[in-house]
Image (cartoon, rainbow, N blue to C red):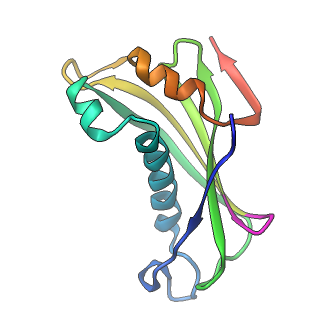
Amino acid sequence: MQAYENPVSLRWSDMDPNFHIRHSVYYDLGAQQRTQYLIEHGLTPAVMVKNNFGPILFREEAVFRKEIHFGDQLTINVAVVSMRKDYSRWSMRHQIKKGDVVCAEITVDGAWIDTVKRKLATPPDFAVKVFENMPRTEDFEWLD
């Protein structure tokens, strides 16, 4: 499970009046990173629509540690923090870094939903394979 990390490009419109990243941009960066990981590993929106399932979030939290300014060279990663053994629910963490310095952490708790029944569900086998190979945090744990 190799780390999955990408550079972050900030836009002028991502800044607040104090020349920091607006708080909602952190969440957008996390969503983009999660989505990019899934798409690159075959879980595209089209595949999810065809198979009547998709991810949902129960909680999303950001912890801001260091200032980020326009022009800073940043990266963002994604890793699974915990997961049920049937892969139906999971938590992921993103770290936004400036070099080796963690500037922010975003944690999301989510699950899979059957988009026809509108009920929580276990994912199809091909989605399980993607999550089996997803990077995990050092403190990863399986949930009952």
Q: Examine the residues drawn in magenta and state their main secondary structure.
A: strand
Specify whether 92 is left or right of 36: right
Which residue is rendered at x = 37% and y = 16% of the image? 121
89 falls in the magenta region:
no
Where is residue 111 shown, x and y percent of the image?
44, 27
Which quadrant holds residue 81? top right
Quadrant, the N terminus: top right
Tell me which residue sits at (55%, 76%) in the image.
21
Q: Quarter-wise, where is residue 63 in the image?
A: bottom right
- In the depicted view, which residue is nearer to us: 144 or 52? 52
Residue 62 location (% of width, % of height): 60, 55
Of residues 12 and 134, the one drawn nearer to the viewer in this rendering: 134
Q: Is residue 26 left or right of residue 116?
A: right
Q: Nearer the viewer, residue 141 or 60?
A: 141
Which segment did they paint magenta?
96-102
- Residue 100 lies within the magenta run: yes
- Whole-percent x, y for residue 71 in the image: 61, 85
Vertical arrangement, residue 2 with respect to residue 49, above or below = below
Please tell me which residue is depicted at 66% across the width and 76% down the height of the picture.
Answer: 73
Of the 4 image quadrants, the one containing the C terminus is: top right
Relative to 21, say whether 63 is above or below. Answer: above
Q: Which quadrant would residue 127 be assigned to in this image?
A: top left
